Image (cartoon, rainbow, N blue to C red):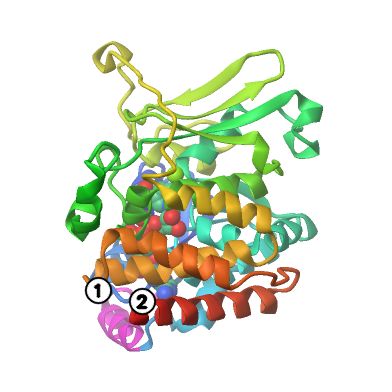
Amino acid sequence: MHGVSVLGSTGSIGLSTLDVLSRHPERFRVVALSANHNVERLAEQCLRFKPELAVMADAQAAGRLAERLKAACPETRVLAGEEGLLEAAAHPEAQSVMAAIVGAAGLLPTLAAVRAGKRVLLANKEALVMSGQLFMDAVHAHGATLLPIDSEHNAVFQCMPTGFDQGLARVGVRRILLTGSGGPFRSLPLEQLPSVTPEQACKHPNWSMGRKISVDSATMMNKGLEVIEARWLFDAEPSRIAVVLHPQSVIHSMVEYLDGSVLAQMGQPDMRTPIAHALAWPERMDSGVSPLDLVAQGRLDFEAPDLGRFPCLGLAYEALNLGGTAMAVLNAANEIAVAAFLDGAIRFTDIAACNEAVLRACTGGQAETLEGVLAADAEARRRAGEWLKCR
Ligand code: NAD
Ligand code: MG
């Protein structure tokens, strides 16, 4: 039995992961589950999967969970806070860890899984965006196996030749082509963008996801974060990473070779495919996703992204070129701005304006130590908070 810890088990990726795991009870065992504060959902999951460990980031919620599970599920230990999350990430009985906490809150637990030499299934792109080189150095130093869950990176991983980690040019790869749907506002008249609501922004045309990544998809900050994610996962220079809009979300990304070949990975827009791919890798197993019907699909369209409509995508390339802590700064500003937008405190177009202002204000930090990255993250959050107040 292959033990799996699921960090962020009550979220969109967490639920899809448990769905896939439940289809293969003879193969996988859930060792640990974690959530922020949704006691009801985590309690149901514990009753169903009987993990050794359940962790709530919120201490009061952990108390309520322990109360709920005391009689009904005595085999599950309940822990709270960061220490609990680190324990779930490094649990000795977990061979694989699904890193599906959203945002910077996932950095330390995901790094703990890496440092424990686990097979790390990375959904939490913000962790890698923030700490880039440091994260990849830890993967190599601790012999961890990093498998991308983000659909684009999972697609690229599937289309890469063996040995890609020795350098893309050496294995004949010219470019990585990340596809993106363009989100709900790809063709909305520009003058309407400032007044779109959080509900409209969270209504993605093809994917069902958590609220933060849904807003990121609407601004295309998500694609920007994914360009940075690809830079680290595949050791690719920024000039080798291109973004192509593909509104149908059937091609999940592509790899272009020196000889002109372009390999694409296709499938339904359902995260259970990359999740099952990474759980079973290097084998294949059923994910519960229905087959792709290309005839019913009919057509696939492509266009270039409009950086005027989606300034956040340009900011990501700018942060990559700045290097150091610029990527952590951009990520932190964006987390603050998206939360403010979801709270109704700012307009949709303020997200990009805030990100740009904070990125330009906090340059030059070194990202060689975790302390440096966390300090840049904190400073960017403070500046973003100020920007939002003074706007
Ligand atoms: P979500 O909001 O649905 O779920 C987030 C999970 O993290 C929940 O279980 C929540 O309890 C937990 N969490 C939130 N804040 C926390 C905190 N401070 N401490 C501990 N736990 C906390 O988000 P999601 O859509 O599942 O996305 C999760 C991650 O996967 C994100 O990094 C996202 O970018 C990435 N991702 C998601 C999708 C998708 O289809 N949903 C696709 C690609 C990548
Ligand atoms: Mg993605």
Using the image, tell me which numbered label, if any, was put on residue 56. none
| Relative image position of residue 381 (x, y in whole percent) | 48, 77
The quarter of the image holding the C terminus is bottom left
The residue at label 2 has a CB less than 8 Å from ligand 1: no
Disc 2 residue crowd, few under 14, some 14–19, many 20+, Cα 10 Å: some
| Between discs 1 and 2, the one toward the N terminus | 1
Quarter assignment of residue 143 = bottom right
Classify mark 1: helix, strand or loop: loop
Chief SS of the magenta region? helix
Which residue type does callout 2 highlight? Answer: Leu
Residue at 19 percent across and 52 percent down: it is: 200
Residue at 26 percent across and 36 percent down: it is: 187
| Relative image position of residue 253 (x, y in whole percent) | 50, 31
Q: Give left or right: position of 119 versus 202.
A: right
The residue to which callout 2 is attached is 388
Classify mark 2: helix, strand or loop: helix
Which quarter of the frame holds ligand 1? bottom left
68 is within the stretch colored magenta? yes
How many dots with numbers? Answer: 2
Q: Which portion, as a residue range, is magenta? A: 60-76
Relative height, residue 268 to residue 78 (above, below): above
Which residue type does callout 1 highlight? Answer: Ala
* Residue 323 in sight: yes
The residue to which callout 1 is attached is 345
Relative height, residue 157 to residue 251 (above, below): below
| Relative image position of residue 160 (x, y in whole percent) | 65, 29
Estimate the spatial distance between the alpha carbons at disc 1 and disc 2, rounded to whole Å: 9 Å
